[in-house]
Amino acid sequence: DKAEQVLNCMKKTGVKPNIITYNTFMGACARAEGNEETRRRAFSLVLAAFSELQAIGLRPDGYTWPAIWQACQCHLDINADLPKINSLFDITVKNGAFNELLFNSVRGFLPPSYLQKKLNRKDDVRTLTVHDLPAEWTRNVKLGRVKDPTKKKSKA
């Protein structure tokens, strides 16, 4: 409630929220506690904030997606809310937003069978890294270099 009050107060007084404001707001909503109704409302606020930030021309960044998925993990049920989860997953892929932080978060929330189906793989997806994902999933993020395990560090 307090995060929502701050965001609304900013808008009423003419202070334009930026991406950091929205990410912080969504993170606060993700950590909301309470009964099922409270958690569902918190998740709805996250989705509304996500729509709003895009409507005013802000672009989701590397912190936006993990905040959204944190809310998903904290407030949705993997079975009962599967249509919402599927939709959110498809939007995330469409945005090419899977960085290492997000992939680890999503992989921790979604059952391995879900990711196996999405990746069309039968092997253990828990051992995959962000570099193993389809290029479409990561096209809008900077990925670090893959470490070559055959190279030894040289001492200078």
Image (tube, grey):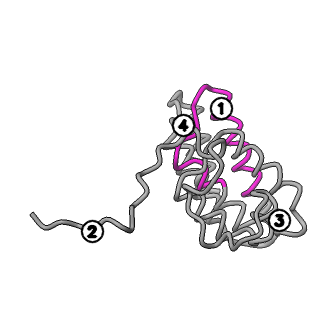
Per the model, the C-alpha gap separating discs 3 and 2 is: 54 Å
Residue that badge 3 annotates: 37
| Label 4: element kind | helix
Q: Secondary structure at mark 2?
A: loop
Name the foreground residue: 124 vs 148: 148
Can you give x and y, in whole percent of width and height, for residue 42 in the image?
72, 57
Q: CA distance from mark 2 to mark 4?
A: 53 Å
Q: What quarter of the picture does the N terminus occupy? A: bottom right
User: Of tags 4 and 1, which is closer to the observer?
Assistant: 1
Q: Which segment did they paint magenta?
A: 41-68
Q: Secondary structure at mark 3?
A: helix
Q: Quadrant of the C terminus?
A: bottom left
Between marks 4 and 3, how big is the CA–CA gap? Answer: 26 Å
Task: Give the image quarter of residue 72.
Answer: bottom right
Mark 1–mark 2 Cα distance, whole angstroms, equals: 45 Å
Q: CA distance from mark 3 to mark 1?
A: 26 Å
Q: Which mark is residue 10?
A: 4
Mark 3 / mark 1, whichever is N-terminal: 3
**Numbered marks: total:** 4
Q: Which mark is residue 152?
A: 2
Residue 54 is tagged as: 1
